[in-house]
Image: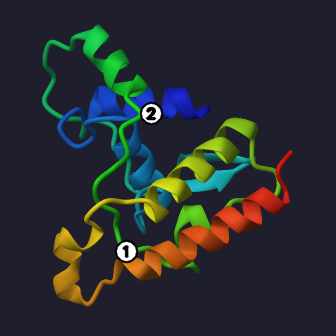
Amino acid sequence: MNVEDTVYEGIRYFPTLFGKKADVLAHIFCTLGGGYNWVDGELCEDLEMPSLEGRHEKPRQIDENNVLARCADRTPFDHCYPMSKNYCNLASVPLDVKDDWFEAALWVADMVINMKNPDSYAYKSMGYKHEDNVKIARQVKKNLLRRKR
């Protein structure tokens, strides 16, 4: 599935979890065990994980224009899960990555690098240092730009 459809589905089915495009992409690229893996150059839901089918938020009247506006919102995210260079999807972008996922990975790396007030988030109490995420994001960006199309 392409980036835009993946973002749309995330916001559509989990509107309180994902407020905007960046929130969906931060989850998909940075969260360990977030339920997505690289398959044929795209991040896809992990079919070996327990299905989310039937676990969507309580059905409600959805304002399609609101969902579309939130999908188009390019406001950066304001927190990021502690990443691992060995396990997060951002650090394992495959060589056969599709163009839209390549661009999304670069955007997420830039957001991690340029995040405002990163140490104000709760993971700090667990010994998390945002600088660790920045190191990973800078290396990912460097590697991606080397193979830019």
Secondary structure under tag 2 reads helix
* The quadrant where residue 101 appears: top right
Mark 2 belongs to which amino acid?
Val
**Is 55 on the left or on the right of 34, as rendered?**
left
* The quadrant where residue 64 appears: top left
Query: Does residue 142 sit above or below 132 in this rendering?
Result: above
- Residue at 38% across, 54% down: 50
Q: Which residue is mark 1?
A: 82
Q: Position of residue 78 (x, y in %)?
A: 28, 54
**Is 38 on the left or on the right of 82, as rendered?**
right
- Residue at 75% across, 41% down: 98
Q: How is the image coloured?
A: rainbow
Disc 1 crowd rating (10 Å Cα; few below 14, some 14-19, many 20+) is some
- Residue at 37% across, 28% down: 73
**Is 43 on the left or on the right of 83, as rendered?**
right
First in sequence: mark 2 vs mark 1: 2
Tag nearer the camera, 2 or 1: 1
* The quadrant where residue 82 appears: bottom left
Disc 2 crowd rating (10 Å Cα; few below 14, some 14-19, many 20+) is many
In which quadrant will I find the C terminus?
Answer: top right
Which of the labelled discs sits on residue 140, or is there none? Answer: none
Front one among 1 and 16:
16
